């Protein structure tokens, strides 16, 4: 459906593989960001603090790769860079899925510990 909407607004057909690659990358990076936000929300009772902490840490992942190459492997936006070129890298895909799974499992663990404490 998204491809059809894109074709309507683009005035014709676009490159299918590149468009689907970008959509896949966008879904993966969004899943990673949402799971990280959920994890930050599980750490605190205040929603405003969780939101601010999430935004600050996600912005830090954008700027830290410019400081050191060590952070390039952890930055979701750096992992997304190949998708708009039409390249689906297995390592980038697996890393984004692993980040999503990691933060989802950490969120579940924190919530279960909070439930057991009460």
Image (tube, helix red, strand yellow):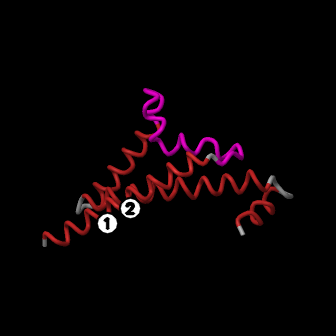
Secondary element under disc 1, as helix, strand or loop, is: helix
Q: Residue at x 43, y 31 (%)?
A: 70
- Magenta highlight range: 63-88
Mark on residue 45? none
Q: Residue at x 62, y 46 (%)?
A: 89
Mark on residue 108? 1
- Label count reads 2
The N terminus sits in image quarter: bottom right
Q: Nearer the viewer, residue 102 or 50?
A: 102
Q: Is residue 71 magenta?
A: yes
**In this picture, residue 25 sits left or right of residue 30:** right
**In this picture, residue 77 sits left or right of residue 9:** left
- Labels 2 & 1 near each other (Cβ < 8 A): yes
Residue 82 in picture, x, y percent from top left: 64, 42
Residue 60 in picture, x, y percent from top left: 40, 39
Residue at mark 2 to residue at mark 1: CA–CA distance: 6 Å
Q: Main secondary structure of the magenta part?
A: helix
Q: Is residue 18 magenta?
A: no
Circle 1: is it few (<14), some (14-19), or many (20+) Cα within 10 Å?
some
Residue 5 in picture, x, y percent from top left: 75, 65
Which of the 4 image quadrants contains residue 14?
Answer: bottom right
Direction left: furthest residue: 118
Residue 31 in picture, x, y percent from top left: 49, 59
**In this picture, residue 19 sits left or right of residue 62:** right
Secondary element under disc 2, as helix, strand or loop, is: helix
- According to the picture, the residue beneath numbered tag 2 turns out to be 104
The C terminus sits in image quarter: bottom left
């Amino acid at each position: 459906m998204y491809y059809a909407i894109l074709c309507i607004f683009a005035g014709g057909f676009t490159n299918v593989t590149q468009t689907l690659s970008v959509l896949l990358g966008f879904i993966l990076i969004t899943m990673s960001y949402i799971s990280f936000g959920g994890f930050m929300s599980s750490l605190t009772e205040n929603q405003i603090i969780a939101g601010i902490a999430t935004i600050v840490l996600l912005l830090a992942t954008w700027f830290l790769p410019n400081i050191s190459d060590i952070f390039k492997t952890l930055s979701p936006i750096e992992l997304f860079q190949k998708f708009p070129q039409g390249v689906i890298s297995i390592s980038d895909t697996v890393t984004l899925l692993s980040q999503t799974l990691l933060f989802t499992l950490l969120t579940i663990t924190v919530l279960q510990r909070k439930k057991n404490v009460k």
